[in-house]
Image: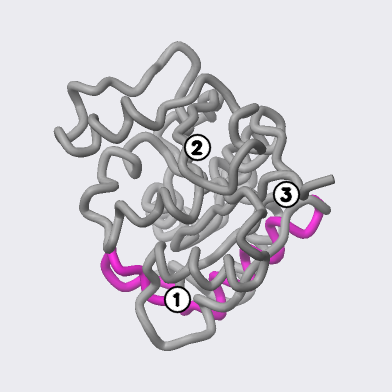
Amino acid sequence: MPDAPLGILGGTFDPVHRAHLHLARAALAQLRLGGVLWIPAGQPSHRQAPHAAAAHRLAMVRLATAGEPRFAVDDAEATVDAPSFTVPTLERLRRRYGAARPFVLLVGADAFLGLPSWHRWREVFELAHIAVAARPGAELQERNMSAELAEIFRARRRGDGAALAAAPAGAIVGFEIEPVEPPDLSATAVRALLRERGDDAQLADLLPLGVLDYIRGNHLYLA
């Protein structure tokens, strides 16, 4: 029996928070994934330098995912002194898992709309499917896409996650993710709250307890 599709969730995770976990769990439930591989970036190519060192961000992702046996952490990007790019990462994973395993790159709607700005972005579809998270009732609108992305979206859009197991790569599917509270939860907002009120009880609702303890123990995001 072929291996179930492998979800791939990359990011800065600066820090990893509840919305990241919410997305990964929704993908597991709806897309029939065999697991989710978390890949913290050492030096993200699209963003400014992270606030916490790669070793700290990697440690926090390990803590956040430790309770879920279907989650695994890949440390290859976080332990090298080079920018992270999606296509080389997927090529590396292909060498590790083989050509037949379906890969599913998990992204939010904003990241998907920005796909044409990615390095070698068209090659992503040769290496993985893309699953786009959206809130219930919300659909990706072609009018919000660039012309080249809209063309690919029309050609590769599939109805649901069942299509992901049929081929190693190439499809675009959507999956629903219920909104979290607060709805604007982001790493930027979490860092701001840590700076302003590092002992606030609200932080326990935004971060896994082990991650919050790690941040406080290592005095991260305080300045």
At a point 34% along the width and 40% down the height, the residue shown is 112
Residue labelled with disc 2: 131
SS class, disc 1: loop
Type of amino acid under label 1:
Gly
Proximity of marks 3 and 2: CB atoms separated by less than 8 Å: no
As measured in the structure, the alpha-carbon distance from the residue carrying label 3 to the one carrying label 2 is 14 Å
Position of the N terminus by quadrant: top right
Crowd class of label 1 (few under 14; some 14 to 19; many from 20; radius 10 Å): many
Q: Counting residues from the N terminus, which is met first, the one under dot 1 or under dot 3?
A: 3
* Residue 172 to residue 82: above or below: above
Type of amino acid under label 3:
Gly
Please tell me which residue lies in front, 85 or 25. Answer: 85
At a point 45% along the width and 34% down the height, the residue shown is 172
Position of the C terminus by quadrant: bottom left
Residue labelled with disc 1: 42
Please identify, in this view, whether the residue under mark 1 or under mark 2 is nearer the observer: 2
Q: Which residues are magenta?
A: 42-68
Please tell me which residue lies in front, 158 or 199. Answer: 158
Crowd class of label 2 (few under 14; some 14 to 19; many from 20; radius 10 Å): many
Q: Is residue 148 shown left or right of residue 121?
A: left
Crowd class of label 3 (few under 14; some 14 to 19; many from 20; radius 10 Å): many
Q: Return the x and y of residue 132 as percentages of the image width and height.
A: 45, 34
Q: Return the x and y of residue 131 as percentages of the image width and height.
A: 50, 37
Q: Counting residues from the N terminus, which is met first, the one under dot 1 or under dot 2?
A: 1
At a point 66% along the width and 54% down the height, the residue shown is 101
Q: Counting residues from the N terminus, which is met first, the one under dot 3 or under dot 2?
A: 3
Is residue 53 on the magenta stretch?
Answer: yes
SS class, disc 2: strand
Type of amino acid under label 2:
Ala
